[in-house]
Image: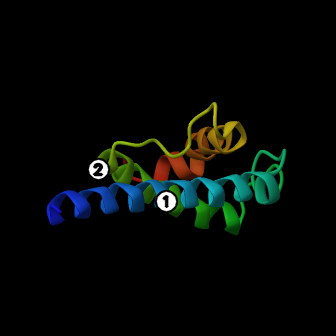
């Protein structure tokens, strides 16, 4: 058997598994952490928003590398809205580089 082909198939399987795991984590964050709130703590940005904002900031380059958008409006509507609210907040907008 072709070991390169097997290695490539395993890599694809691992990537799909990792994407599913990441999606499941995001789903839990959306359902249990964010729920129906504008920010994690309610109407104002708090520590949880700042921490998750750093994660989201690091996701953008990863999305570009792997060619996969993690937080899509149709898959994660509340997280997608949170990203918009968070990135448009004056404190974030004025202090986080593009």
In the shown orientation, is residue 61 left or right of residue 28? left
On screen, residue 31 above or below 73: below
Indicate the position of residue 88 as horizontal and vertical percent values. Answer: 58, 39
What is the quadrant of the N terminus in the image? bottom left
**Splitting the image into 4 quarters, where does residue 96 fall?**
bottom left
**Splitting the image into 4 quarters, where does residue 85 fall?**
top right
Q: CA distance from mark 1 to mark 2?
A: 17 Å
The front one of 56 and 28 is 28
Q: Residue at x 71, y 58 (%)?
A: 29
* Mark 2, other Cα within 10 Å: few <14 / some 14–19 / many ≥20: few
In the shown orientation, is residue 60 left or right of residue 91? left
Indicate the position of residue 67 as horizontal and vertical percent values. Answer: 34, 42
Q: Residue at x 56, y 43 (%)?
A: 71
Mark 1 highlights which residue? Answer: 17
| Numbered disc 2: secondary structure | helix
On screen, residue 16 above or below 68: below
Q: Residue at x 49, y 59 (%)?
A: 17
Indicate the position of residue 27 as horizontal and vertical percent values. Answer: 69, 52
> Which mark, by number, is residue 83?
none
The front one of 25 and 96 is 25
On screen, residue 36 above or below 32: above
| Numbered disc 1: secondary structure | helix
Mark 2 highlights which residue? Answer: 65
């Amino acid at each position: 058997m072709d070991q390169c082909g097997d290695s490539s198939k395993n890599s694809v399987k691992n990537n799909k598994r990792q994407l599913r795991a990441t999606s499941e984590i995001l789903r839990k964050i959306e359902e249990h952490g964010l729920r129906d709130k504008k920010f994690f703590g309610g109407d104002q940005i708090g520590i949880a928003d700042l921490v998750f904002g750093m994660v989201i900031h690091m996701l953008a380059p990863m999305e570009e590398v792997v060619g996969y958008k993690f937080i899509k409006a149709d898959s994660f509507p509340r997280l997608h809205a949170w990203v918009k609210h968070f990135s448009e907040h004056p404190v974030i907008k004025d202090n986080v580089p593009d």
